[in-house]
Amino acid sequence: MAHFPGRLRPNAATLATEAFVQDWAAIPSGMDSMALNGSASNSYSWLSYVGDFYHGALLPLFLLTLFLAFMARPAVKEDIPPGFSTFRLKYLVGWVFCVAADWLQGPYVYALYAAYGYSKQENAV
């Protein structure tokens, strides 16, 4: 774990996440914990098919998000005003550009913190 000289102190969630990542990194690729413990009858696991946990969880979580968004949509019983669709389209185009601009400036935050004296390890946490 990185040393935090009084500027940034990690919270419990950060420390727990770091411990999980370190434990996960200790598992050889293509194997899960059941295969390491010997409790699995077959060394082939779903991780060897998808590559790693993150890629394996991506599609199910995306489908779950779509389902929950569909279920949480508001029920509209009245007609949508005539100019609303064009307003929504203009708004979303502007919103996408703003979010993309914010996303593109992300790497420069690391340079900013480096200028303030933070190390790469402190910056990544």
Image (tube, grey):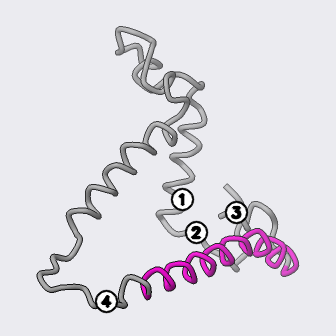
Classed neighbour count for the residue bearing mark 3: other residues with Cα under 10 Å, few (<14), some (14–19), many (≥20): few
Quadrant (top left, top right, bottom left, bottom right) of the N terminus: bottom right
- Give the main secondary structure, helix, strand or loop, of the magenta stretch: helix
Precedes in sequence: disc 4 or disc 1: 1
Which residue corresponds to mark 1? Answer: 15
Secondary-structure class at tag 1: helix
For marks 1 and 3, give the one nearer the viewer. Answer: 3
Secondary-structure class at tag 4: loop
On screen, residue 97 above or below 48: below
Q: Position of residue 91 (x, y in %)?
A: 49, 85
**Which region shows up in magenta?**
87-116
Along the line of sight, the residue nearer the viewer: 6 or 84 = 84
Residue 96 part of the magenta-drawn span: yes
Secondary-structure class at tag 2: loop
What is the three-letter code of the residue carrying label 1? Leu
Q: CA distance from mark 4 to mark 1?
A: 52 Å
- The numbered dot on residue 124 is 3
- Residue at the (27%, 91%) spot, across then down: 81
